[in-house]
Image (cartoon, helix red, strand yellow):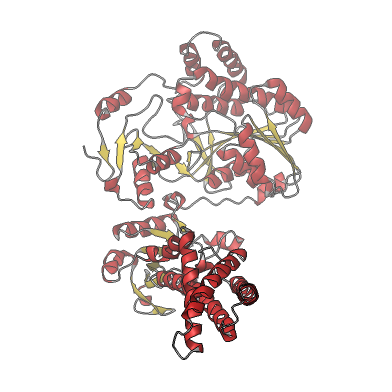
Amino acid sequence: MRRYVVRLPQILFSKRPVFIYAFHAALVAGSLVLGWLLRFDFSLPYRRILLTSGLLLLVIRLIALRLFNLNHGWWHFASVSDAINILKAVAVGSVAFFAVNRYLFDVVAFPRSIYFLEAVLTACFLAGARLASRVLVESVRRDAVLSPKRVLVVGAGYAAEMVLRELARPNSGYVAVGCVDDAKYKIGGQIRGVPVLGTIEELETLVQFNPAEEILIAIPSASGKQMRRITDACQRAKLPFKTVPTLSDIIRGHASINQFREVSLEDLLGREPVQVDLEIVRRQIVGRRILVTGAAGSIGSELCRQILDYGPAQLVCLDQSETGLYFLRLSLVDHKNGAQLAFRVADVCDIERVRCLLTEYSPEIIFHAAAYKHVPMMESNVQEAVKNNVLGFMGLLNLAGEAGCKSFVLISSDKAVNPTNVMGATKRICELITSAKPLNGMRCVSVRFGNVLGSSGSVVPVLKQQLCNHQPLTITHPDIKRFFMITPEAVALVLQGFAIGSHGDILVLDMGEPVKIVDLARSLIRLSGKSENDVEIRFTGLRDGEKLKEELFYEQEKVMPTSCDKIKRTSALLSDWARLSRQLEELRASLTIDGAAPIRAKIKEIVPEYIFQENDLQQDSSEFLAGRQFRAAGGHD
């Protein structure tokens, strides 16, 4: 109803100019008649003069109003300038009317006092109509603000007090009906006049007696485990929820306490994000020349941003994606921290191009993030996977040593452990190369981690897109699990590994327990404000090269601690470098043979743990899941 009231002036005035002229004519005529009545003690003598002069007055007034652009209908935006234009239009119209009526048409019987009375009344009516329109619209808007969204606040600490202070501001659009907190001694008290109603676990019951439309989580220091418990309580209460930024964001000035955001998947990681001491990284990066391959990717771009925080002398960003580098440059141009930036389009497999770049920039440190990473795609493009991930890496590694590079860091994957796909097997070969290659003045380190939440092409963006398009969420198997990290964690591991790793080390982050993809999908559904019963989850069967659960270590690998509690160092029985070099040359030669089978066989020779035939589990899951659809809530037919 309010919406129609607000739009009424628009419909009548701006959409129908004829109505504007008619309304103005009625105001002028009314002013003239009222002035006449006041002059003649509320009687209407000399009606012939009143009628003929009145018609002339209407024409002159409408022309004057048109000249001063007062024929529009946006009266709810009326301002002082409109009032001034009204005075000008009335003054010009009155002078013109007096001159034409008295001297051109010689109507001397028209009372002189009416010229003044009519002008005053017309000006008042024109201004009053606009003022009334503006008051009407603003009163309706005020009514909308006076019916703000009712919210419950989770938390009763300092952050909650600041949130309630923001909510109490005029026109905030919110009104707090209560707070909940696990500190039972706070229950029954008040914060800025808002009562603390009960505990977080009682949220579902409390909203029944204290109706609310939304929940605001005001605990910026909440851990991932705490956030999961809180969001589960919000889900049981069947209310949408938002949270304030983290304390670190507030302290760094990236956000303020009154900026609410949707709860992110990072909040539901299920463990505390790993914090590593990167001061040692600063000492090794400051003033150095650094090259990042795959710089436009999810990991590469975050690497570039974090590296710049430590003051390198020069950062060279290399990627074969022109568009990706363009947007990376836009994001880094104001973040270079005194470093010289270079953005170069190149394919790591182009040996001559890479040699020229290394000669030009002479990097002291190289972070190699360029690789093909999508498992199903690489299963059908085996030659390209080996060419890019293995041969391109080997060429870059050899040229880096020739160019005098001091440290080389390889980005590996948990899929390199007991690989069942080409992508993982190529990563394992690269790990073997960095571990077995003689030192020769360049320290080589590999870092191994799991899936990165939100990286391009990973499961989370795919599920988000499906949810946005109102499509079923597709998951390969109800029991499939993965280790998950957030991008800053992954990059922190890369930088920490670079700082503490010795030549040949493979460093692995402690990522906690693996997370079921189906649980991640259900969390995503809840975060979107939907019910799990409203969104279909469809299981499609394991794809070629995919296994139910990834691993972090081989059985024969010896796991050793490092100076960082959350990072482990592995040691395995590795191949002799001469033998491995011969196998790699045979792998290169196998690319010239038609078909993927010879390449897979050679990979199997280098990585005995590699299993590339479709296993029974994949066949069974495909048969079991084919044609079936599952609901998110229970996974039943």
Q: Quadrant of residue 3?
A: bottom left
Residue at image point 72% right, 20% down: 352
In this rendered view, identify the residue nearer to me: 332 or 199. Answer: 332
Left or right relative to 2: residue 556: right
Which residue is outermost to the left? 637
Q: Is residue 528 above or below residue 622?
A: below
Q: Which residue sits at x=63%, y=22%?
A: 349
Residue 122 as seen in the image, left or right of residue 310:
left
Which residue occupies the extreme top position in the image? 593
What residue sits 63% from the left and 41% below the top? Answer: 328
Horizontal and vertical percent position of residue 484:
45, 42
Count of all numbered marks drawn on residues in the image:
0
Where residue 240 appears, x then y in whole percent?
36, 58
Reply above or below: 109 against 6.
Answer: below
Based on the displayed image, in which of its 4 quarters is residue 83 positioned? bottom right
Nearer to the camera, 553 or 2: 2
- Residue 149 at least partly seen: yes
